Image (spheres, grey):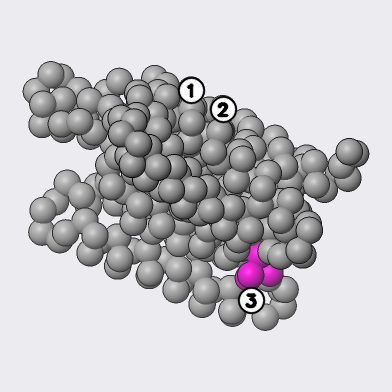
Amino acid sequence: MIFDNFLLYALLGGIGLAIVAGPLGCFVVWRRMAYFGDSLAHSALLGVALGFLLSIELTAGIAVTCVVFSLAIVALQEQRRIATDTLLGILSHTALSIGLVALSLMGSMRVDLLGYLFGDILAVTAQDLIAIYAGGALALIVLAAIWRDLLAMTVHEELARAEGVAVFRVRLVFTLLLAVVVAISMKVMGILLITSMLIIPAATARRFARTPEGMAALASAIGILAVALGLTASLRWDTPSGPSVVVAAFTLFLASLGLAAVRESVHIPPARGH
């Protein structure tokens, strides 16, 4: 079957996102950071407004905003006066609202708000692919460098600190990696759907992986499968591409629950992730 360029670019863009989102998503699931990922994605809309206002590349504006948001969260987490979930709620909704207000004031510009909220994977260009794969490769290289320390922190943060792990630095680096992934994947999945690609494949893989590394690889594979199934469904039934990918990922998650139930019913010990 010969793909049109737009479909090939969409598939490659989704695959690139799935490859990097799998390992990062495992730590999001393990460390129960789903709300943080969602909050980080919400702040991205402010980056869109910043990009328009300063006439710079939107991906750069989104990246700057997400990095600043990440730094603010990590710094504020060091103080114990306000709970982390409260801080995330305040900052994420404020950033989202400021972004919406700023975009609404740009009367002379036509802004595809739905495209930014839900993404448009079928609009991925060759330049977008370069950003996705270059940013994704950088994120994976850095993640590999901090993998052991981050895993130790995830198992027991205080013990990791006692063993000499630079907890604050590792947490900061991981947070910045999430910011990079949000920035490069916004066009593919949109602000409201980015977190789903971090969480759902990782949650699906968790029931079947025997090691943390195995879970990371399986999460990426499940994400790639969800992209392929979602795009196929989108083309066949003319449904929104980004949401179709998420629905496909959720379908795979439900299938994993059913498979796990079958395994338990026939007394096959389930594989365990981290």
Q: CA distance from mark 1 to mark 3?
A: 39 Å
Q: Quadrant of residue 264?
A: top left
The residue tagged 1 is: 141
Quadrant of the rendering where the N terminus is positioned: top right
Q: Three-letter amino acid code at disc 2?
A: Ala
Is there any visible trace of residue 180 in the rendered image?
A: no
Residue located at (51% from left, 77% from top):
101
- The dot on residue 106 is 3
Q: CA distance from mark 1 to mark 2?
A: 6 Å
- Give the mark nearest the N terminus, 2 or 3: 3
Secondary element type, mark 3: loop
The magenta-colored residue range is: 112-116
Tell me if residue 108 is in the magenta stretch: no
- The dot on residue 137 is 2
Quadrant of the rendering where the C terminus is positioned: top left
Question: Which mark is nearer the camera, 2 or 3?
Answer: 2
Secondary element type, mark 1: helix
Secondary element type, mark 2: helix
Note whether 190 is above or below 222 in the view shown.
below
Q: CA distance from mark 2 to mark 3?
A: 35 Å
Residue located at (56% from left, 33% from top):
221
Is residue 28 or residue 36 the one in the foreground? 28
Is there any visible trace of residue 112 in the rendered image?
A: yes
- Give the mark nearest the N terminus, 1 or 3: 3
Residue located at (82% from left, 48% from top):
6
Is residue 239 or residue 198 the one in the foreground? 239
Q: Are marks 1 and 2 in contact (CB under 8 Å)?
A: yes
x, y percent for residue 209: 39, 29
